[in-house]
Image: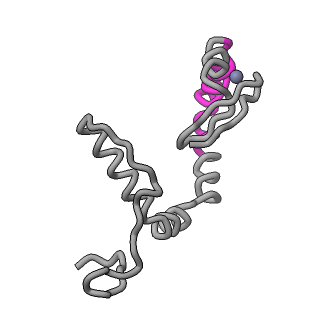
């Protein structure tokens, strides 16, 4: 959860996941004003050019390796997210915090160091 300040009004808002520039009210106002529609219209008009651009952009900004590295270094986050998703799917209350998940370096009983290798 990140707190940001809206680009068109002084309100701050919290976001999770995707990048947002505007608060919800301003985003809706922009859609109604046609600012977003103009972008979508332009994209549809120049579809092949847009596709070429996006392919090139994604090739340049390929972050797969970074994501894998991040997931490997943030094991707790993966466990936390999957637990939260599971709770949401089962309609259960979820009140864990990321700090509640502590993964020890060693198995407390066998004194073997823990790795992510299965088997
Ligand atoms: Zn706003």
59 inside magenta stretch: no
Give above or below for 32 relative to 68. Answer: above
User: Which residue is drawn at the image coordinates 37% and 58% (left, top)?
Assistant: 79
Residue span colored magenta: 33-51
User: Which residue is drawn at the image coordinates 35% and 80% (left, top)?
Assistant: 114
Quarter that holds the C terminus: bottom left
Closer to the camera, 106 or 83?
106
Q: Viewed as shown, does residue 108 lie left or right of 25?
A: left
User: Which residue is drawn at the image coordinates 68% and 12% (left, top)?
Assistant: 33
Closer to the camera, 95 or 7?
95
Name the image colouring: one colour
Q: Viewed as shown, does residue 51 lie left or right of 7?
A: left
Q: Viewed as shown, does residue 108 lie left or right of 33?
A: left
Give above or below for 97 relative to 10. Answer: below
34 inside magenta stretch: yes
**Snapshot quadrant of residue 46:** top right
Main SS of residues in magenta: helix
Residue 34 x/y as whole percent: 66, 15
Residue 13 x/y as whole percent: 64, 30
Closer to the camera, 57 or 79?
79
Residue 113 x/y as whole percent: 36, 85
Q: Quadrant of ligand 1?
A: top right
User: Which residue is drawn at the image coordinates 48% and 65% (left, top)?
Assistant: 74
**Snapshot quadrant of residue 50:** top right
Residue 80 x/y as whole percent: 39, 54
Quarter that holds the N terminus: top right
């Amino acid at each position: 959860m990140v707190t940001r300040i809206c680009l068109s009004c002084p309100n701050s808002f919290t976001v999770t996941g995707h990048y947002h520039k505007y608060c919800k009210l301003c985003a809706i106002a922009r859609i109604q004003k046609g600012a977003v529609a103009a972008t979508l219209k332009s994209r549809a008009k120049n579809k092949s050019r847009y596709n070429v651009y996006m392919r090139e952009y994604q090739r340049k900004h390929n972050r797969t390796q970074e994501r894998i590295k991040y997931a490997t270094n943030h094991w707790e986050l993966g466990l936390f997210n999957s637990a939260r998703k599971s709770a949401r799917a089962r309609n259960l209350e979820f009140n864990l915090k990321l700090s509640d998940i502590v993964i020890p370096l060693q198995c407390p009983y066998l004194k073997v160091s823990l790795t992510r290798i299965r088997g």
